[in-house]
Structure formats: structure tokens, C-alpha cells
Image (cartoon, coloured by chain):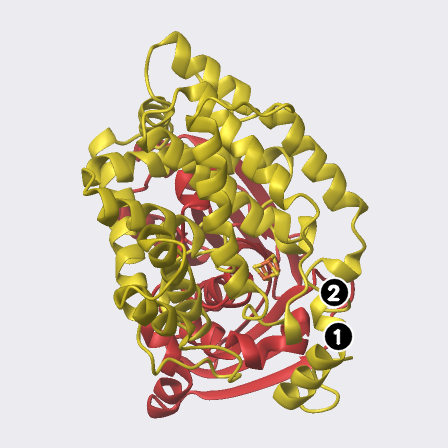
Amino acid sequence: MNVFDIIGPVMIGPSSSHTAGAARIGKTAALLLGAPVAKADILFHGSFAKTYKGHGTDKAIVGGILKLDPWDPGIRTSLETAKEQGISVTIRTGTIENAHPNTALVTLTSDQGSTISVQGASVGGGNIVINKVNDMEVYFTGQNTTLIVMHQDIPGIIAHVTNLVAVGNANICNFRLNRQEKRGLAIMTIEMDSDFDQSLVSQIQTIPHVYNTILLKL
Amino acid sequence: MQLKYNSVEELVAAASSSNKKISEIVLEQQAEDMETSKETVYSTMENSFEVMRQSVLNGMDETLRSSSGLSGGAAAKLKKAVDEGKNHYGHLLGNAISMALAVTEYNSCMGQIVAAPTAGSCGVIPSALISVLEEFDLPKHDIIMSLFTASAIGMVIAKCASIAGAEGGCQAEVGSASAMAAAALTEIFGGTPQMVSDSCAIALKNTMGLVCDPVAGLVEVPCIKRNAMGVANAFTASELACAGITSAIPADEVILAMKQVGDLMSTALKETSEGGLAATPTGCRLRKQIFGTDSASS
Ligand code: SF4
């Protein structure tokens, strides 16, 4: 936690949990998809489901899917913008088992037909926790600079990636690996103390069996 | 020296022993923590301050209305009275209260604001600081530095209690904002670090037990007017502390009491809109009006 978690974020109102946090969940999903969004299906749970209209949570999360930041006034008109860009948006409400009261499940389909589903919770003050990606349990907040590498679970990849992190002179403060099954899809989340060089991200992206690499700093 | 933000006492001791203001040691330490320069950290804060200023201006628009229809236009009304010299409690207080309304109304209308510490309580700190900046023509630098003191107090409260209405009730949001504003004001007006701590304690004592009961679950009623109360409370607490009046209960104990009170508080009074003002006949009627019969009440 630092001073800007307390005096901050700069955001579009009215609620840090119901707008800023929602926008961050949407943006994270769009970044993880890593391709232009054609279709967005949003499921709101708990307080999100009950009050999303009055809070503009729908506008915020769609704004995020358009890669707008929580402080971007474009959030106010995000639903219209999505329509103009030909993105079809569906908003549903329902119950997600054992989920935090402010949870959204965002399923995105790219223009190429690839999909990703991201479940995130808005845990207060605009901070979020991503709990699931494609039904796989994960945990990251984006508070620190976070490198997310989606790859196939095969030997040597972790060493390869962390080597490049060392080249970037970044200190790792948290490392996590989640995988669906042996040799299946795996997600590495590496949180770092300082910023990370974008060119190294591109290098990681070229490692064989790496599907998608994103650098997240919310 | 490494600050842990586990207590207000720690901040007071660190500042006193190095003969500095709390804001100075916090800025130094944050720059170190973020592995960047003091100038960068300062200018990020300056940027937030400018957003605050803009939100005060934008929120004064008399035509503002939130999408629920519950709020908008109150700040402009009060400002008019203040400008015409028709308010009763002086220019500074009237101005400060109207600014608190302006920022929070703008927030309700999906305007750009700075959460401080939350969006629901975003009006207290800007209104406290910008109203005194205008009234006394203070150096802007002092005001921006004071935001580091406010944040440090906020960090301690976040660590030892909570700054979320859903966890601690409104004492955690408007109460914390008020304590942070009081601390900032006390430093601006030359108070010692101990006085900063006392003003924080006094402000929090005054909001102890305040519940979070937003009508229809929206950050409008009672939030907007509570921000106006929050700035008046910050003035009171800082005025007392700067006159050398101490808090009988030290700040850290007040914060722990606030945590305990928050834990004891029924969940009906913590942002669920099941109790307090949200559950009044009028509160329920407004909810129905905004969301229809079933969507928000289930
Ligand atoms: S009543 Fe609840 S939502 Fe409103 S400002 Fe207070 S804590 Fe925030």
C-alpha cells in the first residue's frame, strides 16, 4: 500500500468499488484476451447484480473492456462506444458460488473467435482481485507491476521467463504458478517491485509454448 | 528510517525525532519505497490535487443531476448563498461545505474525482484544503505536502481498522476522510506532529459508530451531506488541536476502538442498505422508484 492507494485513484464516480474496480476488471479481461473484442458477456453477482444500474457499473466494466482506465471520462459513454465499434455486449445478473459480493465474470470473444473468461472481485477502494481465468484459480491484484504469462505447462519455461525478468533487473516480490493439468494451460503471475521493460515482454512472448504475455499495472 | 504505518505514534515519533514534518518523512519514504524520486512522487500528488480542484469547479454546475435523480444542484445553491453573503456561519465554513457537496455531487454524476480515501468520501479532503487555500492565500506547496500527512493517517487507519464502508461503516469512510483532513489542516497551520495526531483522534472520536446506510445502495443519500459534515468536523478537530487541546484517548487507541465498533456493527449497517436511512419508508420508496420492485431489494 502506498499514498496513492489512499489519496487515489483518480477515477470516474460514483463508487470506487462499483465503478473504478469494475473498470479494472474489464480492462484486465481485455488485456488477457490480447486481441480485439467482438463479444462481451458480463455476469454480475451480489451487490454488483443488485445495484449496477444506479452505480453505472455496466458502463464502467464495458469502459474497461474498451481498455479505458478508471479515470477516463469516456466511461460515461462506453455503452454507445461499444455499439459503434460493433462489439456486442450482454449483461446478466446471477449468483456465482462462494464469490465476493462485488464480483463480475467477464467472458470475451475476440474477432478471431478466441475466448477468455475472467472472474474478478472489486474489494474496496478501487482495488481488485482476479480469482479465476478460464475457470482456473488464480490470484493477482495488479497493484504491483505484474507480468502474466499464459503458457503450456512444459519443463524449462519458468526458468526461461525468470531469466528475462533478471535481465530486466526487476525484483520479484511474488511468484505464482497455476495450471489446469499436467502439460495443460498454465498461468504464471510474477509481481515485481519496480517497472518492467516492455521490450522484454515482447521477448518473453517469443518463447516457444508461450501463448500470451501481458504486463499489468492497474 | 523505515516507516511501517502501523501506528500514528510511529509517525509522530519519526517526525519529532528528526525535527521534520510528518509529510516530509512520508514523502521521502514513499519515494524510496516506489524506487523513484521525491519530485516524481510530489508531482503525482500535485496532479491529484489539480483533479480535486477541477472537481470542485465542475461540481458547482447547478444543472448537474445524477442518473438516479436523487442528487445534484445542492452545491450551487449553497455557493450562491455564500457568494451573496447570505449564509450564517462565515465565508470559510459555507464555502468549504459547498465544495464538499460539489465534489460528491459531481462524483454521483459520474464525474472525475480523486478517491480520498474512497469515492463516497471524496469531498472532505478537497473541500477542507481548497477552502483554506483560497481563504488564507496559502502556498500551494504546503497544501500538496499536507496530502502526504493525510495519506499517512489514512494508511494507518486502513491497516489497523478499515477505510471501507462495507467493512467498518461510514466511520471508516467519511470518518477517516475527516481525520485525514484534520491532520492535514493541523500541519498546514503549523501544528506539531503530536497536534496532528490529536486532531486525527478528535475527528475520529466524533464519527465513531457512524453507519453506512446508502439509500438504494447508491453513493448519494446520505453520503453527499455527510461529506459536508466531514469537513466541518475536520475544522472542529483541527481548531481544537491547534489550540493545544489534546485528545484524552490517543489516536491509535481511537483507531482500534473504531475497528472494534466496525466489527460489532450489524452487516445491515455496512453498505448492504438493509438498515438505517436506507430502510426508512422513504428510503425504500426511493429504491423502488429507481430500480423497480424487485431488482435492488432481493
Ligand atoms: S454512507 Fe456508506 S457509501 Fe455513503 S459515504 Fe458513508 S460509507 Fe460511503
Q: Amino acid at mark 1?
A: Thr
Height in image: A175 above or below A121?
Answer: above
Of residues A125 and B274, the one nearer the viewer is: B274
The residue that appears at 33% across and 66% down in the rendered structure is: B86
Q: Mark 1 and mark 2 in contact? Answer it, CB < 8 Å.
A: yes
> To which residue does mark 2 refer?
B276
Q: In terms of image quadrants, where is residue B27? A: top left
Height in image: B237 above or below B213?
Answer: above
Residue B276 image position (x, y, % from top left): 74, 65
Whether residue A213 is visible, yes or no, is yes
Residue B4 shown left or right of residue A37 in the figure: right
Of residues A45 and B137, the one nearer the viewer is: B137
Chain rendered yellow = B
Whether residue A69 is visible, yes or no, is no
Marks 1 & 2 on one chain = yes
Q: Amino acid at mark 2?
A: Gly
> To which residue does mark 1 refer?
B280
* Chain letter of the residue carrying label 1: B
* Chain letter of the residue carrying label 2: B
Please state the quadrant of the image where ligand 1 appears: bottom right
Residue B16 image position (x, y, % from top left): 40, 12
Of residues B243 and B169, the one nearer the viewer is: B243
Dot 1: what SS?
loop
- Chain A: give its colour: red
Q: Give the spatial CA distance, label 1 vs label 2.
A: 7 Å
Dot 2: what SS?
helix
Mark 2: few/some/many CA within 10 Å (<14, 14-19, 20+): some
Please state, as top left, top right, bottom left or bottom right, where the N terminus of chain B lies in the image.
top left
Residue A31 shown left or right of residue A150 in the figure: left
